[in-house]
Structure formats: C-alpha cells, structure tokens
C-alpha cells in the first residue's frame, strides 16, 4: 500500500511579490522549516497522520506571521473570526469550526467536534460554547490581533477592498489590487497533509479568512470537500480565494479524479489547478497513499514545504 511517509504544508497562496524583501521572506521560510521538522519527527516517532497534521497546523496557528490563530486577519469590524477543519482519510471522519473568536487553536476544536460530537461542523456561538465545554485554551481578542493586521484592515478600508493580494476581486464592487504597497502580503492561511508508511492519510486547514471580510463570512478552509479533504487515495489542503475554491469543490475534485478516473496525484492536481478555479486564485498541497507529493498553485506564489521518507525535502515560496 504505502511507500513511506510524506508530509506537505502551506502558509498561504496569493500574489506574493517576486521580490519579497528578505526580512519578510526569511522569518516565514524558517517557520515553515521548523513546522516541517516538527511534522517529520512526529511521523518518524510513529504518530498518526491525524496527530501530525493537527500538531503542525497548531504550530502555524501559534505563529503571528501566518493568517490563522494568532495573526489572523481582521473582519470589517476589526475583530477576528477563525475557521478550521480536519479530516482522517481512512475513516472519513471529519470536523470543522467557523467564526471562533477566542479559541487559540481552532484546528484542535475542529478535531474535538469530530471526536466528541455526532456532528461535523459547528459555527459561531455554538462552536464557542462547545469550546468552553471542552475546556480548550482560549484568549481574548488582543492575543490574536497583531499591529500588522490592524494596518492591513486600515489599508483595505481606505481602498474599499475585501482583500489585498489576489488578482481578482471577490465581489463586483471590490477594487482589484494585486500588490500591497509595502511589499508585504497578508496571505498565510495554513494547512498540512500527511501520510504514514501504511498509507493512512489526513488533512487539516486553518485560517482567519480574508482582510475586511463581513462578519459571518465563511471561506473554503472549514468546508470539507472544498478547502480540506482526505480519503484512502489522498489528502488535500487548499488556500486562496475561498469563494472560488468553494465553487470548484477543489479538494474533493482531486480525490474524485483519483478515485473515479484512476489519475495519479500529480495528474489529478494538475488538472484541478488548471480547470478547478480561475487563474490567479488558489493553490493546494496534497499527498497520496503511496507517498507522492504535489504542491501546485496558479497564483504567483505559495508559502510551502514538504518532505518524504526517501529523503526529498523542499521549502519554497515562488
Ligand atoms: N482560503 C482562505 C479563505 O478564503 C484564505 C486564504 O487561503 O488565504 O478564507
């Protein structure tokens, strides 16, 4: 079945300036490398892929440079509303949360939804109440809100746009802007996929969403089949314009092409990157049951990293 473990993770796709300054690039690359190493040692220690993707995504959520957990981008009211999901390939068990405001690690709350409730998806007050019940670690909004994100919201409001980094607007009235004036990028939704040597697969994704989003807006990240999916063929985590990823049911389409059409992971992901949603809108990381890795994107870049048991390893942006 399996041909060795493999892991891939992302820290967001978008219109990342090709000349991203070293002081923006370096801390993100080293965070990706750190998270990759964390995942590799967990896999080597025999932790399940489900544990591994949760662990890696938690670490990325705790890092203020990524748009998930601490460092989440802000809603139009200057608040944080976080979304996350997790899925186990073998059992197809999955869990998701939306609109959480106080939970430090939304991905772990998603896992608790999967393991401790008969449901798949809890949102807003219900998700918060469940978090209290499960006594997960919480913090007030000031923990999540970073000065950089306060500034990004300000810039977005001044320009009347919902987000700063994608080449297409997500609503008609929204102005198209492809670059951020200071060369920074707020993208940084995070995700991880992993497979062990027996071919067990898992995927997880976590995000603060998009800058200046409406209160209550839900993107693709917590939606099983759109932002996250895993079965016995592959595990997929997406990033990009949530509305386009939802319309394209991107993560499930990769799995469906493998399952119903017999495509390899590389073939399925290439097909979906070209045909699943418009150019310039998304990227994904994926692994197959046999340890193949794919990390395609149709944006200018995607913060990403991967490694496999055969010794291959990569950290890249463009
Ligand atoms: N997909 C995320 C969302 O739309 C954003 C991102 O990946 O940067 O909420």
Image (cartoon, rainbow, N blue to C red):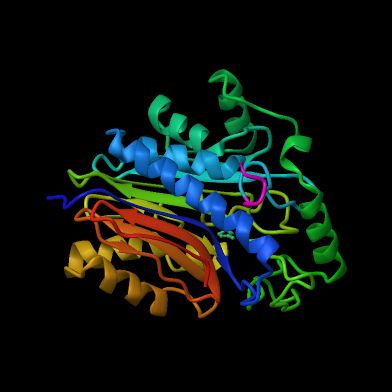
Asked if 63 appears above or below 245 in the picture, the reply is above
Task: Return the residue nearer the eye: 252 or 41.
Answer: 41
Residue 181 found in image quarter: bottom right
Task: Return the residue nearer the eye: 180 or 100.
Answer: 180
In this view of the protein, can residue 259 be seen by the observer? yes
Q: What stretch is highlighted in magenta?
A: 63-67
Residue 272 found in image quarter: bottom left
Query: Is residue 65 within the magenta segment?
Result: yes
List x then y, in percent, for residue 163: 70, 66
Q: Which residue corresponds to the image point at 32% horizontal and 65% vertical from the top-left?
A: 254
Q: Which residue lies furthest to the left in this view?
A: 1
Asked if 177 appears above or below 111 in the picture, the reply is below
287 on left or right of 305: left
Q: Which residue corresponds to the image point at 21% horizontal and 68% vertical from the top-left?
A: 264
Asked if 260 appears above or below 237 in the picture, the reply is below
Q: Which residue corresponds to the image point at 17% horizontal and 43% vertical from the top-left?
A: 198
| Number of callouts | 0
Query: Is residue 74 within the magenta segment?
Result: no
Q: Report the predominant secondary structure element of the magenta stretch.
A: loop
**Quarter of image, ligand 1:** bottom right
Asked if 49 appears above or below 242 in the picture, the reply is above
Task: Return the residue nearer the eye: 94 or 269.
Answer: 269
List x then y, in percent, for residue 117: 42, 27
List x then y, in percent, for residue 262: 16, 68
Q: Which residue corresponds to the image point at 71% horizontal and 75% vertical from the top-left?
A: 179
190 on left or right of 198: right
């Amino acid at each position: 079945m399996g041909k060795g473990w493999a892991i891939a993770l992302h820290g967001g796709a978008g219109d990342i300036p090709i000349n991203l300054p070293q002081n923006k690039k370096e801390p993100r690359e080293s965070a990706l490398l750190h998270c990759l190493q964390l995942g590799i040692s967990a896999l080597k220690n025999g932790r399940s892929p489900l544990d591994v993707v949760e662990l890696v995504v938690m670490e990325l959520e705790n890092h203020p440079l990524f748009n998930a957990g601490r460092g989440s981008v802000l809603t139009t009211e200057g608040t944080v509303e976080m979304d996350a999901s997790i899925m186990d390939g073998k059992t197809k068990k999955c869990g998701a949360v939306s609109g959480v405001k106080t939970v430090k690690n939304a991905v772990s709350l998603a896992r608790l939804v999967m393991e401790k409730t008969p449901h798949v998806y809890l949102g807003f007050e219900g998700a918060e109440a469940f978090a209290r019940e499960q006594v997960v670690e919480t913090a007030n909004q000031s923990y999540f809100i970073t000065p950089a994100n306060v500034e990004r919201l300000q810039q977005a409001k001044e320009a009347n746009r919902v987000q700063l980094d994608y080449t297409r607007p997500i609503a008609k009235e929204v102005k198209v802007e492809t670059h951020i004036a200071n060369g920074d990028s707020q993208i940084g939704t995070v995700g991880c996929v992993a497979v062990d040597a027996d071919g067990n697969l898992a995927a997880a994704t976590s995000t603060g969403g998009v800058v200046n989003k409406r209160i209550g807006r839900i993107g693709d990240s917590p939606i099983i089949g759109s932002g996250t999916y895993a079965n016995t063929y592959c595990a997929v985590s997406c990033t990009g314009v949530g509305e386009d990823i939802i319309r394209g049911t991107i993560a499930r389409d990769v799995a469906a092409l493998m399952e119903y059409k017999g495509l390899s992971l590389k073939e399925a992901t290439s097909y979906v990157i070209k045909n699943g949603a418009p150019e310039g809108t998304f990227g994904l990381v994926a692994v197959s049951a046999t340890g193949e890795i794919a990390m395609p994107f149709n944006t200018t870049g995607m913060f990403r990293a991967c490694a496999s048991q055969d010794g291959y390893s990569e950290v890249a942006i463009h």
